[in-house]
Amino acid sequence: MTDAYEALTAKLAAADPEIERLIEAEGRRESEKIRLIASENYVSEAVMEATGSILTNKYSEGYAQKRYYEGQQNVDQVEELAIARAKELFGVDHANVQPYSGSPANLAVYMAFLKPGDTVMGMALDMGGHLTHGHTVSATGKWFNPVRYGVRKDTGRIDLDEVAKVARKERPKLMICGGTAIPRTIDFEGFAEIAREVDAVLLADIAHIAGLVAGGAHPSPAGHADVISTTTHKTLRGPRGAMVMCDAEHAKAIDKAVFPGLQGGPHNHTTAAIAVALHEAARESFRDYAGQIVKNSRALAKALTDRGYDLVSGGTDNHLILVDLTSKEIGGKPAAKALDAAGIELNFNAVPYDQRKPFDPSGLRIGTAAVTTRGMTEDDMDPIADWIDRAIGAAKAEKEAELEAVAAEIREFCQTYPIPGWHD
Ligand SMILES: *Cc1c(COP(=O)(O)O)cnc(C)c1O
């Protein structure tokens, strides 16, 4: 064990061995598996230290220089630094770094621009959208009037002509672009043109691709979307948190919606860790990281295609691959469970126009942000595709021993790529 790791967990081990053991086990799990969950990553030790800092002790309702509690001499500076770094990195006028996570960040945007019952237009969940884009079970679908767009059946891609048609008919007040299972570049400019035509506010939700945008591997919505929301913990590789960014015109409305509209005190330890992550993302090496994520994703997409897997839209432009297993005659859920047993962690996912039920859909969602953080490159993607294929084959043939054999190979492979924040 490294000294730093022991120092970090010694107090916890003494105070609460049960929890310490579970964290230790999770560290082992995260280090021994190939983690392909598209929304996950490994944060740096610096981000982790800020997250675990004494800033968690402080209450700071309000904004810098306008707080409701005393003692903000340091916290104000932390939040101002995070804001300045977000503005610089994303090229925006204003940033609010207080939302607790991506879902509350999106709700803040609704709060800023809509009244209950107003029409909001987002991508359907089963086409790649997010719950908070107006799905029926979400507050955003229950309290507002959701209308939806999807992708074309023949191309698996968003068709802006269809988006425009729905927008002209439904006249939404808020239009959302972005999602959770979109393997292709989002045309922010095209969406902005439609939003302007129907006089809607355009929200670009870049939760998944924020790191790619920051690192220049995906076009930026800045200058096109009125508002940009993002989580900070996916490709951006920060702590669990979120930001809402906008032009100067909407700054007041957004800030008021986050606090006091929806939230109480901000999580200052998270704000500090966001500032650290933004600092890391502004470095030249992060541009290389973002570029490598996409290179790895393309290489993995090709390696899977070579093995006869169908990919929604035929490939990928970003960190994400959506596999349609229909032709492989196995459901997404049994495949994902078998892969987990074989040391490959990902999630089952609906594919557009899925013929199966949402809880056992036809697809697998794959992302390369986490493996790229570990230092894996294109050369590693072919073996990964091979392990995926072997595990799926073993699942179909019900060969448990083969899953275990793959898991053992992967454990060994992973030793070459240590993860930050955990001992060897
Ligand atoms: C992950 C995600 C969110 C929600 O983030 P949470 O932190 O899980 O609440 C919102 N929108 C999109 C597009 C996402 O991918």
Image (cartoon, rainbow, N blue to C red):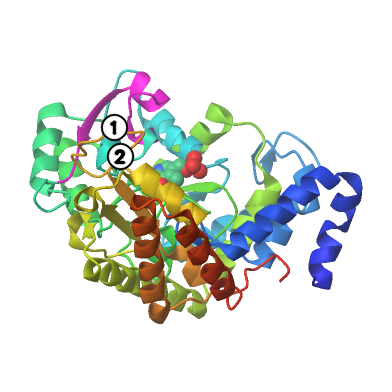
Q: Is residue 95 left or right of residue 32?
A: left
Q: How far apart are the two marked residues, 2 and 1, measured between alpha carbons?
A: 5 Å
Q: Would you name the residue on which mark 2 appears?
A: 361
The residue lying at 86 percent from left, 64 percent from top is: 7
Question: What segment is highlighted magenta in the picture?
Answer: 132-151
**The C terminus - image quarter:** bottom right
**Crowding near pointer 2: few (<14 within 10 Å), some, many (20+)?**
many
The residue lying at 37 percent from left, 49 percent from top is: 335
Residue 72 seen anywhere in this rendered image of the structure: no
Looking at the image, residue 289 lies above or below residue 173? below
Q: Quadrant for ligand 1?
A: top left
Locate residue 164: give its quadrant.
top left
**The N terminus - image quarter:** bottom right
**Circles 2 and 1 in contact, beta carbons < 8 Å:** yes
Q: Would you name the residue on which mark 1 appears?
A: 357
Amino acid of disc 1: Lys
